[in-house]
C-alpha cells in the first residue's frame, strides 16, 4: 500500500479539514500526519485509522521574532523531512509546507499535492512586503507540485490569474453529512422563552467577522430575538460583557468540534458574519460556521460576500445583508423570520445532500488517482 504524508504547521486540534482529508485518504493509502507538538492537545483517546506524528520544536524556548521564527521553521523542516522521506505522496497544507514538500520531492522522487486552504499570501490585514515575500515563495514552488487543491471557487480563479496554474480542484471544508435531531439546549440553558427566535454566531471572536455590527444590532433590537455567541478568541471578554449587559445576548464557550453541529441545531437561525474590503481571503471566505449552520439545518443570515452568497441564492437557504449599509442586518433578520419554515427545510436538505464531505472526499481521491 502506498504511503501519504500529510504535513501541516499547527497542532492539528482545530484543523478539521486536515483530519477529514487524512481519514478520506486512509481508505486507499497508508496515511500519517506530521504536525506540531502541543502538550495541551491529546489525541490518545481518538481512534483514528492513520498515524499522527507530532514534532517537538526545541527552538520554541527561544521566544519570538523574525529570526527566531525562521529558526523554528528550519527545525520543523529538518525533522519533517526525515519522516516524510520514504513516502510516495506529500500532501502539503498551506504555503509554509509547500517548500518542505518540494524539497522532499527533489531528494527522492514522489508526488506532491498542494492544498491551499485560502488565498495563502493574503490571509488577513498585512503589509505589502509580506505579501511580496509570500508571492515570491509561492511562485517559486507552486509549479513543482503535481496536483493542486483549494477551498473556494474565487480562490481557484485567483490562483489561475496570478500564477497561471490551472486545474485546481475545489474541495470545500464542509462537515460530513449529519442527520440532526432538534432540541432546546440553548433555551433551557439560558431560560429563553419558546416564542423568541434564536440566532447563533459560532466561531472565532476576532476582527473581520462583523461582530461589532452584529452585536450592536441585537443590542438595539431586543423585540423577539436573541443572539447566542458560541466560540472563543481575542474578543471573548468583550462578548462576555455584552451578555451581562443585555438580556437577549448570551455567551457560550466553544465546544469540541465533534459537538458543534448538535449544539448548533438547538438555535433557530445562524449568522455568518464577514467584512468586505479587508483582503482577498476575507472577501471570499467560506468559514466553517457557514457549513455548520446548514448541516445543523439552520437557515442562514450571511453578508454579501460572493462565496457564501452564491450558495445562499442557489439553494435559497437564507437572507443576505450588506455589512456597510446601516439597517441592512436587521432587515435581513426580519426577512428570514418571515420566510416559510417548511420551504427552508426542503431547501436546506437539498443543500446538505449536495454539499457534504462525502462528496468532497470523491474529489480528493480523484486527485490522487489521476
Image (cartoon, rainbow, N blue to C red):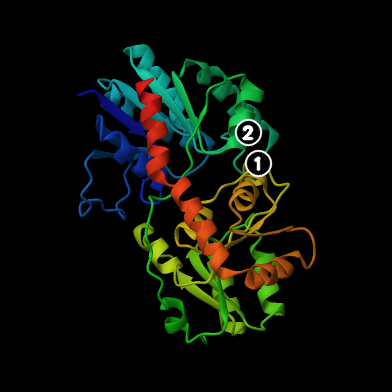
Compute the Cα span from label 1 to label 2. Answer: 7 Å
Q: Is residue 333 above or below residue 82?
A: below
Q: Residue at x 36, y 46 (%)?
A: 12
- Residue 49, percent from left and from top: 21, 41
Q: Which residue is mark 1?
A: 126
Q: Quadrant of the N terminus?
A: top left
Residue 130 numbered tag: 2
Find the residue positioned furthest to the right: 326
Q: How many marks?
A: 2
Badges 1 and 2: C-beta atoms under 8 Å apart?
A: yes
Q: Is residue 134 left or right of residue 76?
A: right
Label 1: how many Cα within 10 Å (few below 14, some 14–19, many 20+): few
Q: Residue at x 66, y 72 (%)?
A: 338
Residue 4 placement: quadrant: top left
Q: Secondary structure at mark 1?
A: loop
Q: Secondary structure at mark 2?
A: helix
Amino acid at each position: 500500500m502506498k504511503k501519504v504524508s500529510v504535513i501541516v504547521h499547527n497542532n492539528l486540534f482545530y484543523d478539521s479539514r486536515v483530519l477529514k482529508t487524512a481519514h478520506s485518504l486512509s481508505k486507499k493509502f497508508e496515511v500519517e500526519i506530521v504536525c506540531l507538538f502541543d502538550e495541551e492537545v491529546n489525541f490518545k483517546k481518538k481512534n483514528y485509522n492513520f498515524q499522527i506524528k507530532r514534532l517537538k520544536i526545541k527552538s520554541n524556548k527561544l521566544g519570538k521574532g523574525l529570526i527566531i521564527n525562521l529558526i523554528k521553521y528550519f527545525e520543523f523542516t529538518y525533522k519533517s523531512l526525515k519522516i516524510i522521506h520514504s513516502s510516495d505522496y506529500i500532501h502539503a497544507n498551506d504555503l509554509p509546507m509547500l517548500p518542505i514538500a518540494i524539497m522532499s520531492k527533489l531528494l527522492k522522487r514522489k508526488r506532491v499535492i498542494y492544498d491551499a486552504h485560502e488565498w495563502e499570501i493574503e490571509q488577513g490585514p498585512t503589509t505589502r512586503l509580506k505579501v511580496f515575500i509570500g508571492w515570491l515563495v509561492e511562485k517559486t514552488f507552486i509549479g513543482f507540485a503535481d496536483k493542486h487543491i483549494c477551498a473556494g471557487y474565487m480562490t481557484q480563479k485567483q490562483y489561475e490569474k496570478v500564477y497561471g496554474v490551472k486545474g485546481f480542484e475545489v474541495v470545500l471544508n464542509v462537515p460530513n453529512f449529519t442527520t440532526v435531531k432538534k432540541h432546546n439546549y440553548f433555551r433551557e440553558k439560558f431560560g429563553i422563552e419558546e416564542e423568541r427566535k434564536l440566532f447563533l454566531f459560532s466561531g472565532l471572536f476576532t476582527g473581520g467577522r462583523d461582530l461589532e455590527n452584529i452585536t450592536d444590532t441585537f443590542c438595539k433590537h431586543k423585540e423577539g430575538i436573541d443572539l447566542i455567541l458560541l466560540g472563543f478568541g481575542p474578543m471573548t471578554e468583550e462578548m462576555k460583557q455584552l451578555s451581562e449587559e443585555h438580556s437577549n445576548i448570551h455567551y457560550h464557550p466553544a465546544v469540541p468540534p465533534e459537538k458543534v453541529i448538535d449544539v448548533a441545531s438547538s438555535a433557530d437561525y445562524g449568522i455568518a458574519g464577514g467584512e468586505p474590503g479587508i483582503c482577498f481571503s476575507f472577501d471570499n471566505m467560506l468559514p466553517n460556521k457557514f457549513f455548520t449552520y446548514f448541516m445543523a439545518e439552520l437557515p442562514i443570515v450571511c453578508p454579501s460576500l460572493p462565496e457564501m452568497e452564491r450558495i445562499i441564492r442557489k439553494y435559497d437557504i437564507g437572507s443576505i445583508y450588506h455589512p456597510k449599509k446601516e439597517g441592512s442586518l436587521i432587515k435581513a433578520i426580519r426577512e428570514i423570520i418571515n420566510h416559510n419554515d417548511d420551504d427552508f427545510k426542503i431547501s436546506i436538505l437539498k443543500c446538505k445532500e449536495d454539499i457534504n464531505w462525502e462528496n468532497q472526499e470523491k474529489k480528493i481521491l480523484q486527485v490522487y488517482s489521476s
